[in-house]
Image (cartoon, rainbow, N blue to C red):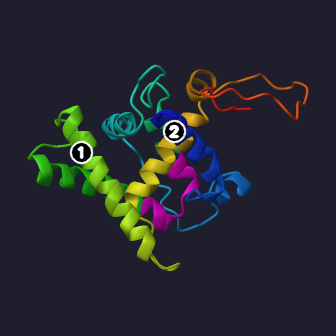
Amino acid sequence: MNRREAISSVALLLGGTLIGAEAFISGCKTTDKNAASGINFSKDDIAFLNEVGETILPATATPGAKEAKVGEFMAVYVKDCYDEKDQTIFVEGLKKLDDASKKKSGKTFMDSTPTQRHDLLVDLDKEAKDYQKSKKDTDANHYFRMVKELTLLGFFTSEVGATKALRYVAVPGKYEGCIPYKKGDKAWAT
């Protein structure tokens, strides 16, 4: 199993535990009257999110996160589905990510090489996992986990992710409860 297959499997398994997963039930659009509805992502912010997403899910034999436009997806999802607290964590997290890049390599994330970006995100992923182990229910979410989850969600629910990284059969179709699986087959998107 290669990295992309592992990520797609994990994304499908963790789908119900995503930060902001209640949005699937409520249909997004936050009802919190205090939500930061004035939050807006600039084209530069979306380009930044696309580059972070591409570092998490780079193009290989299948398209990467940038081709799936995960930056645009994240901007809409954060604005429409996150509550004010998580919106603030996410936006401040982008600044923290860029500051961590400057501290680690002396360059902004956008000016860093792909290897420097990868190494930074590996460090941030470890930090987020360590934080998650000791996190209490009342503690805030870690910004990098939010970015990573939205990258996976945005990619695997996009047309590109569903049709080129996963196997896809247009619905409606007949139900087949038992389909033979061959080692190396892609996971199903439908």
Q: Is residue 39 visible?
A: no
Q: Position of residue 145 (x, y in %)?
A: 43, 56
Please give the range of residues in magenta: 77-88
Q: Position of residue 171 (x, y in %)?
A: 82, 26
Q: What is the CA distance from the residue labelled 2 to the residue labelled 1?
A: 24 Å
Up-down relation of residue 154 to residue 134 (above or below): above
Extreme-left residue of the structure: 106
The amino acid pointed to by label 2 is Phe
The answer to whether residue 99 is left or right of residue 21 is left
Res. 73 mark: 2
Please, what is the dominant secondary structure of the magenta stretch? Answer: helix
Query: Which image quarter: residue 18?
Result: bottom right
Q: Mark 1 = which residue?
A: 119
Q: Position of residue 179 (x, y in %)?
A: 81, 29
Q: Nearer the viewer, residue 75 or 112?
A: 112
The amino acid pointed to by label 1 is Asp
The nearer-to-camera label among 2 and 1 is 1
Query: Which image quarter: residue 164?
Result: top right
Q: Position of residue 16 (x, y in %)?
A: 66, 56
Query: Which image quarter: residue 131?
Result: bottom left
Q: Residues within 10 Å of mark 1 (few under 14, many from 20)?
A: some
- Location of the C terminus (image quadrant): top right
Q: Secondary structure at mark 2?
A: helix
Q: Secondary structure at mark 1?
A: helix
Q: Is residue 5 visible?
A: yes
Q: Nearer the viewer, residue 68 or 83?
A: 68
Q: Residue at x 45, y 31 (%)?
A: 65
Q: Residue at x 48, y 33 (%)?
A: 2
Q: Residue at x 19, y 49 (%)?
A: 101
Q: Residues within 10 Å of mark 2 (few under 14, many from 20)?
A: some
